[in-house]
Image: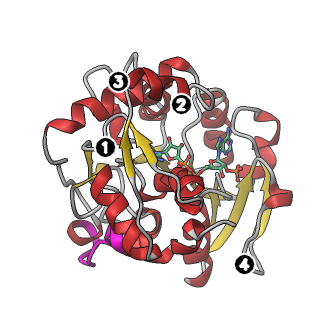
Amino acid sequence: MTTLVTGARGKVGQGLIARLHAAGHTVRAASANPAELTVPDGVGTVELALDHPEGLDAALRGVRQVFLYPEPVGVHELIKAAETAGVEHVVLLSSASVLGPDAETDPLASHSLTVERALAASDLTCTFLRPDAFASNSFGWAYFIGRSMPVQLAYPDAHIAPIHPEDIADIAFEALTGESLTGRAITLTGPESLTFREQLAVLADAVGRAVPVEQITRAEAERQMGRFMPPAMVGSLLDLWAAASHGPATVADTTETLLGRPARTYRQWARDNAGAFAAQH
Ligand SMILES: NC(=O)c1ccc[n+]([C@@H]2O[C@H](COP(=O)([O-])OP(=O)(O)OC[C@H]3O[C@@H](n4cnc5c(N)ncnc54)[C@H](OP(=O)(O)O)[C@@H]3O)[C@@H](O)[C@H]2O)c1
């Protein structure tokens, strides 16, 4: 029984492929850019950009389960091709944002919500993993920390419960190989609520250098973030962090509650990835 893992170069996809292969499952790694993909020996690869359906039939041949990154463009073609190929179960890397009050119109949340709804209306058995913010979003600070520049934030006291991507890979592995999570929609977080300021203090410990934090205005943050993402997405993220500044984030399901194994802390993520924040000369 072959499992297709999409988004194979992504942090969750990589961890999941390694786990499935190590446990003896047949896994096919699908990437929009397989030339840049590294997989364990014995894992087949296939080119698949989810927003371009051309590669679907070849990618899905002989596949019974799919780990899916959310891409609304082309989702109906994907579902049709999956049903035709005999796929039985799809585990979607969705997002906790689908639970927000404005999920239908919010540009971040609607991306995942559209895919959830299309899958829910299909004949496929679907498991929705809905993580909150990834600890790996902190890579966005690496440039500044590496150059000993202050990290500038509009909402440094926004609380989140960041989840280690390896925890998501553990839970995705269980969703694909066990029965306890099949068919469920599960909100996932890390084990503790931390503000951005607290996360930066943990990173400072991990790299052994001070990491100054500088509060900037929302307008300045809009200007800076607008260089990398569309204005609607910038507004959505800033609104989220403004709302998160009022108190601790809720801790939802973790590897502890779902698998009985302690959830990886943000401190562990910082230790695992300290090299990415090393001083740049
Ligand atoms: N970051 C967060 O805080 C967060 C929170 C909740 C949910 N999520 C969801 O988790 C997913 C990944 O998170 P991430 O961006 O932080 O990083 P990531 O793990 O680095 O994943 C990015 C990967 O997504 C794959 N991908 C993107 N668009 C694709 C497409 N059209 N077709 C095929 N594959 C595509 C790419 O894989 P290939 O290049 O190998 O194809 C890429 O490696 C996102 O879809 C996001 O909605 C993220």
Compare marks 1 and 4 and give the one earlier in the sequence. 4
Magenta stretch contains residue 238: no
Helix, strand or loop at label 3? It is: loop
Q: Nearer the viewer, residue 218 or 111?
A: 218
List the residue tagged with mark 4. Answer: 40
Q: Which mark is residue 156?
A: 1
Per the image, the residue denoted by label 2 is 225
Q: Position of residue 22 (x, y in %)?
A: 59, 83
Q: Residue furthest left?
A: 247
Nearer to the camera, 149 or 33: 149
Sequence order check, earlier mark of 3 and 4:
4
**Quadrant of residue 261 within the rendered picture:** bottom left
**Front tag of 3 and 2:** 2
Extent of the magenta region: 258-267
Q: Residue at x 57, y 28 (%)?
A: 72
Quadrant of the image occupied by residue 19: bottom right
Q: Residues within 10 Å of mark 1 (few under 14, many from 20)?
A: many
Mark 3 or mark 1: name the one nearer the start of the chain. 3
Q: Secondary structure at mark 4?
A: loop
